[in-house]
C-alpha cells in the first residue's frame, strides 16, 4: 500500500485524491516556441496546457460557454461551427489532464495527441468550408504542422526499426522537425498583408479590395516597382528569373531568412506608412509613387548574394 502514496494530493475539504505523477520533463521546441512537456508514470505523454495555446499562436482565455466548459475544450475549439466535428472519440483525446509535476505541484495539460487532433479538426472544417476568416490562419498552420509531424514520425519509426535511435543525437528529431517547419513556414508566411492591397485600391480609386476576388493583374507590376525594385540592384531581375510562374511560387520565397525577409518586412512597414499618409492627405496613386521615388529611390548598388 506504500506505493499508493505516490501522487497523493490534498484536495479541497481535506479529502485526498490520487493524481498521476510526472517522471520526466522537458521542452519541445517547435517553430521557435518552447513547449513544456512531461511523461507521466502511467506512460502518457502530456503537453502543458499553455503549450497547446502557444503551439497554435492563440492567447489563453476562459471558455465562452457552459457546454464548452463541461467538455473542457481549449478555447479555440469551443466555436459553434467546430463542435459538430468533435466526436466522442476526439473528446476523449482532448480532455484536460491533471497531474503532479516533478516539483510536487499540481499541473494541467493535454495529451500529446491533442496537437495533431486539433490540426485534423481545422483541416476538416476547411474542407467543409465552414471556417470563419479568423480561423483560416489556424487551418494554414495546422496543415504545416500535420505534414511536418508525419515526416518526423516516419523518421522516428525507421530509427526505431534499425536501432539508430540508440546512437542518434538527443535532439536530432527536434532539429529535423524545425528544419522542415522553417521551410514550410517560409512558403506560407504572408509577406504582403491585405492592407497593402486595400491601400493600392484606395489610391487608384478602384472598388473596395476583396480577398475573395482576384487582384487586378497590374497590381503585380506595381509591387515589383515599389517593393522589389527598391530592395537592391538586380534583385527584381534575379527574382523574376527564379520565379517564371508566380502562381506556383511567390517571389519572396527566394529571399533568405536572415537577410532577405527582414529587409522585405522593414520596407513593407515603411510603404504601408506612406500609403496611409497619402490616403489621409487625399492624394492619388501618382503622387504616392512620386513620394516613394523620393523616399526610397531604386537601388544603384547590388546587395549581398545572401539576399536571394
Image (cartoon, grey):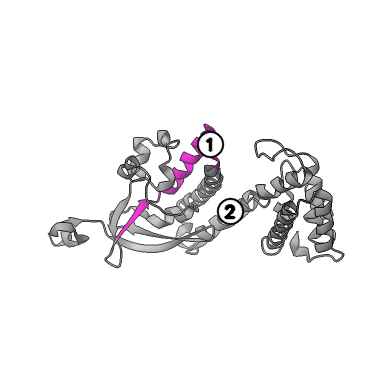
Is 14 left, or right, of 68 in this rendering? Answer: left
Q: Nearer the viewer, mark 2 or mark 1?
A: 1
Residue 125 is one of the magenta-drawn residues: yes
Q: Answer few, some or many: residues within 10 Å of disc 1's Cα (few below 14, many 20 plus, some between 14 and 19).
A: some
According to the picture, the residue beneath numbered tag 2 turns out to be 180
- Start and end of the magenta stretch? 107-133
**Most foreground residue, 156 or 229:** 229
Is 94 left, or right, of 241 in this rendering? Answer: left
Residue 178 coordinates in the image, percent (x, y): 55, 57
**Most foreground residue, 302 or 220:** 220
Extreme residue in the front direction: 281
Q: Answer few, some or many: residues within 10 Å of disc 2's Cα (few below 14, many 20 plus, some between 14 and 19).
A: some
Residue 126 is one of the magenta-drawn residues: yes
Residue 231 visible:
yes
Q: What separation in Å lies between label 2 and label 1 (alpha carbons)?
A: 23 Å
Is 13 left, or right, of 120 in this rendering? Answer: left
Residue 308 coordinates in the image, percent (x, y): 75, 59
Residue 242 visible:
no
**Most foreground residue, 149 or 299:** 299
Q: Identify the element where label 1 is drawn.
A: helix
Residue 196, compared with residue 299, is above or below; it is: above
Residue 28 coordinates in the image, percent (x, y): 45, 60
According to the picture, the residue beneath numbered tag 1 turns out to be 126
* Occupied quadrant, residue 210: top right
Amino acid at each position: 500500500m506504500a506505493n499508493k502514496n505516490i501522487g497523493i494530493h490534498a484536495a479541497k475539504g481535506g479529502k485526498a485524491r490520487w493524481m498521476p505523477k510526472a517522471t520526466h520533463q522537458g521542452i519541445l521546441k517547435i517553430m521557435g516556441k518552447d513547449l513544456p512537456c512531461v511523461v507521466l508514470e502511467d506512460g502518457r505523454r502530456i503537453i502543458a496546457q499553455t503549450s497547446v495555446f502557444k503551439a497554435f499562436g492563440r492567447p489563453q482565455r476562459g471558455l465562452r460557454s457552459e457546454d464548452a466548459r463541461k467538455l473542457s475544450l481549449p478555447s479555440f475549439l469551443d466555436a459553434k461551427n467546430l463542435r459538430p466535428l468533435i466526436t466522442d472519440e476526439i473528446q476523449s483525446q482532448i480532455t484536460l489532464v491533471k497531474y503532479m509535476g516533478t516539483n510536487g505541484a499540481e499541473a494541467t495539460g493535454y495529451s500529446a495527441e491533442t496537437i495533431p487532433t486539433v490540426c485534423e479538426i481545422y483541416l476538416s472544417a476547411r474542407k467543409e468550408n465552414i471556417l470563419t476568416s479568423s480561423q483560416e490562419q489556424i487551418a494554414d498552420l495546422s496543415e504545416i504542422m500535420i505534414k511536418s509531424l508525419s515526416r518526423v514520425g516516419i523518421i522516428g519509426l525507421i530509427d526505431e526499426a534499425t536501432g539508430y535511435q540508440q546512437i542518434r543525437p538527443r535532439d536530432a528529431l527536434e532539429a529535423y522537425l524545425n528544419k522542415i517547419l522553417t521551410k514550410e513556414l517560409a512558403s506560407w508566411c504572408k509577406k504582403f498583408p491585405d492592407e497593402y492591397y486595400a491601400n493600392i485600391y484606395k489610391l487608384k480609386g478602384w472598388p473596395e479590395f476583396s480577398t475573395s476576388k482576384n487582384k487586378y493583374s497590374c497590381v503585380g507590376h506595381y509591387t515589383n516597382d515599389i517593393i522589389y525594385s527598391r530592395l537592391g540592384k538586380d534583385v527584381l531581375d534575379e527574382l523574376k528569373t527564379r520565379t517564371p510562374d508566380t502562381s506556383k511560387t511567390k517571389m519572396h520565397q527566394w529571399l533568405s531568412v536572415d537577410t532577405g525577409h527582414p529587409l522585405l518586412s522593414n520596407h513593407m512597414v515603411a510603404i504601408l506608412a506612406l500609403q496611409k499618409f497619402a490616403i489621409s492627405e487625399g492624394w492619388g496613386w501618382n503622387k504616392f509613387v512620386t513620394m516613394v521615388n523620393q523616399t526610397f529611390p531604386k537601388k544603384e548598388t547590388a546587395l549581398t548574394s545572401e539576399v536571394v
